[in-house]
Amino acid sequence: MTNIISMKPVTLAEVKDIIADLDSKPELKDYLKEFSKLTRKQSDEIIESLRKMNNAKFKEEYIIKVADLLPKNAESIAKIFDDVSLDEKEINEVLAVVKEN
């Protein structure tokens, strides 16, 4: 039985680093290959840029989702930030971060 010591959201790129032997987990390896679009460095840059904005609406789990899903429009961002209302400026800031990385 495994005991959970702590939980924190991580990007798919980080999962690749955490799981030592992906070859022994073919389903996970296939999933990560299909859905992980960025390198660890790229996703870390997006995360750091969003954190630097110091916006209370940008919860850690939302930041991680942005780095994984790379939203391209306001509608996609609204789906990620589903329980907060972002104004146009905040949406454009998130889109700018995604676009530059």
Image (cartoon, rainbow, N blue to C red):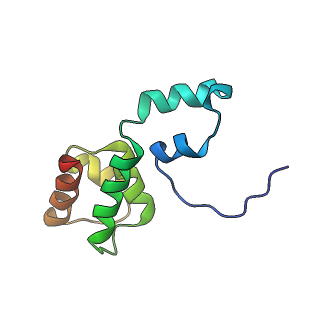
The image quadrant that residue 54 belongs to is: bottom left
- Nearest the viewer among 52 and 85 is 52
- In percent of width and height, residue 83 lies at 38, 63
Residue sitting at the far right: 1
- In percent of width and height, residue 11 lies at 46, 49
- Above or below, comparing residue 38 to residue 48 in the picture: above
Residue at x 28%, y 62% (from the top left corner): 49
Judge left or right: residue 49 versus residue 93: right
- Nearest the viewer among 15 and 82 is 15
Judge left or right: residue 76 versus residue 7: left
Residue at x 27%, y 52% (from the top left corner): 77
- In percent of width and height, residue 44 lies at 37, 54
Residue at x 65%, y 28% (from the top left corner): 25
- Above or below, comparing residue 100 to residue 58 in the picture: above
Q: How many marks?
A: 0
Judge left or right: residue 54 versus residue 31: left
The image quadrant that residue 86 belongs to is: bottom left
The image quadrant that residue 87 belongs to is: bottom left
Residue at x 36%, y 40% (from the top left corner): 38
Q: Is residue 21 visible in this depiction of the protein?
A: yes
- Nearest the viewer among 21 and 34 is 21
Q: Is residue 81 visible in this depiction of the protein?
A: no
- In percent of width and height, residue 12 lies at 47, 43
